[in-house]
Image (tube, helix red, strand yellow):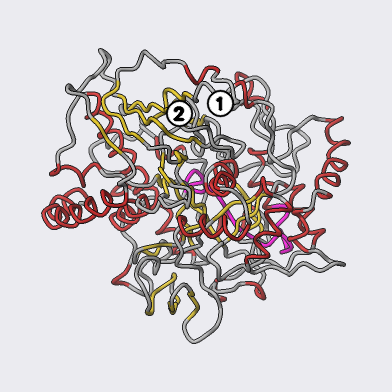
Amino acid sequence: DVRKEEEEEEEEEEEEDADVDAKAARSRKHFKWTHPRHDVVDDDGRRFLRFVNARMLSRDGSLSSPGGSLTVDLSTGTIVSVVLPPDDDEEEGDDAVGRETFRVRSVVDCQNQILSPGYIDIQLNGCYGVDFSNAGDVHVDKALTVKDVMDASARLARTGVTSFCPTVVSSSKETYRTIIPLIRRARMWQRENRMRWQQRQRQGKQRQRQSQRQYEVGANILGMHLEGPFFAPSKRGAHDERHIRSPVHGIETVKEVYGLSSDGSEEFDDDDDDHDVPREVIEPPKPEWQDVEIITLAPELEGAFSAIASLTQKRREQPQDDDDDDEEGEGEGETHPSPLNHPIVVSMGHTSATYQDGLTALSHGATLLTHLYNAMNPFHHRDPGLVGLLSPHVELLLKKEQQPLQKQQPRPHPTQPHPTRPRPQHHRHESKPLRPFYSLIADGIHVHPTAVSLAHRAHPAGCVLVTDAMSAMGLGDGIHSLGNMSVNIEGARATLANTDVLAGSVATMERCVKNFKEFAGCDAGEALLCGTLHPARVLGRDVARTRRRKEVVVVEPPVGVLEVGAAADLILVNDELDV
């Protein structure tokens, strides 16, 4: 149905695309795109695109000297070569392999502008009139559809966002059971579209204007961010109080509220006899653990610590040899057995938690703070609250707490890289901070610039920029929806109708990154890291991620980095960070 609708709308969208292309051409006047006389394809069907004369972002936030180049394999969508200028301080190493071997289809002259990984927004409630929490129970005419998700994805890419986590606010059980499978269908449809586009590249076919919309896939749809409903009532903010609750029975309450009951293997179950009948007809789709990336909850609630330990068990445990995973995955000493094979990031937010509550949550596996400063207790010199977790003193406390456990059974801290994940040799010395990551809404409304600067100075490696944008982003002033609530937009400020309660933002990631550079007083490279590498590290996606689906092992390429083998999710920005 989605494909049929897009085919019917192609004629109308051609004019819109022409306007967009013209605008893009004007904004990219600094960049030159050249084509060889002949469209060159290697014998194995691979086609290559090369970016030259670029300053490239590295993992430490530095920018290479002008003159670097990066080559992309269009048939796989991955980076195959990264070459730094000969006079650069860093060694070229293995990244320079293939400097002369790839036959390039097209070349983009970046004119010494900055080549960066695309932005990753891990908290996005909606945009351009699309509300990821709207299941149609209140605003029936605005109920979310797969086409809505795909349209939002395509438009987000124009703001520099190449990956995002659709975020659902505190909702009813019925809403979760509707929205989570719907987002999965959009994600699978996007993957199918991308595979079809890559197949066209291998076949040497040019993209025609008539099929441009059909193969436009936009920003990557990642797993979902479930923000709520396990919140402190006094810190619910713009969330509907009717849905706020506590995870009294730990993981069992979480499963019951979200409707999550599997490890995600059903999606790839080929044992059904009715192959010609869509699965949705045989059995309505259900929410699955593999649909979720992040869950935000208040750690001080009854049952929360147990839920955190269960949700993050797979992220924290250290498996033995690959062949013994199934036999040794459940130790006799485990008090919080994991119900899933998919790692979940647990974030602390909308909470009245104390500093000690935060330390306990970290020791149980939490690794993130949701929109720092907002919907949490303020910092106080005698009770620093969750804001105090940004202090280096936290690492000393956690290391002391881990020492006795390490003598009995060595395990990495939940924020340490998974030992089985491959990563380039020259990055193996890196480790994630023991302190939590923290997200910031740098829209100039939610957090004062001085508070942004303080947080960054205290813990620069943990800063993650998010928009927390709602459906009104890109639409202008007026009354818009957030789940089953009405939100008033005036300028850059979004509040619940007839109140002063902030209800997300309407800022783009491009605006947040530019604001952050100004507020924190940092350079362009540091600001870019907060929108690229840092969110990728939160999700464990800055290195290749291997996921087992029944008998199939799927390797997902890294994102948020410019390295050989990483996904070619790229943006070009100038020194003012205009995309």
Q: Nearer the viewer, residue 236 or 255?
A: 236
Q: Nearer the viewer, residue 44 or 522?
A: 522
Count all numbered tags in the image, as a single digit. Answer: 2
Residue kind at label 1, given as amino acid type: Asp
Residue lying at 44% horizontally and 29% vertically, measured from the top left: 67
Task: Say which quarter of the image contains residue 539.
Answer: top right
Q: Where is residue 411 drawn, in percent x and y?
A: 75, 32
Magenta residue span? 288-306
Residue lying at 29% horizontally and 22% vertically, measured from the top left: 104
Q: Where is residue 485 drawn, in percent x and y?
A: 45, 76
| Label 1: few (<14), some (14–19) or many (≥20) C-alpha neighbours in 10 Å | some
Give the CA separation, mark 2 to mark 1. Answer: 9 Å
Q: Where is residue 158 drawn, in percent x and y?
A: 35, 52
Q: Secondary structure at mark 1?
A: loop
Q: Where is residue 259 drawn, in percent x and y?
A: 50, 55
Residue kind at label 2, given as amino acid type: Gly
Q: Which residue is mark 2?
A: 68
Q: Which residue is mark 1?
A: 88
Q: Nearer the viewer, residue 65 or 3?
A: 65
Does 299 appear in magenta? yes
Instruction: State if disc 1 and disc 2 touch (CB < 8 Å).
Output: yes
Measured along the vertical axis of the image, is residue 456 above or below residue 414?
below
Q: Is residue 125 left or right of residue 157?
A: right
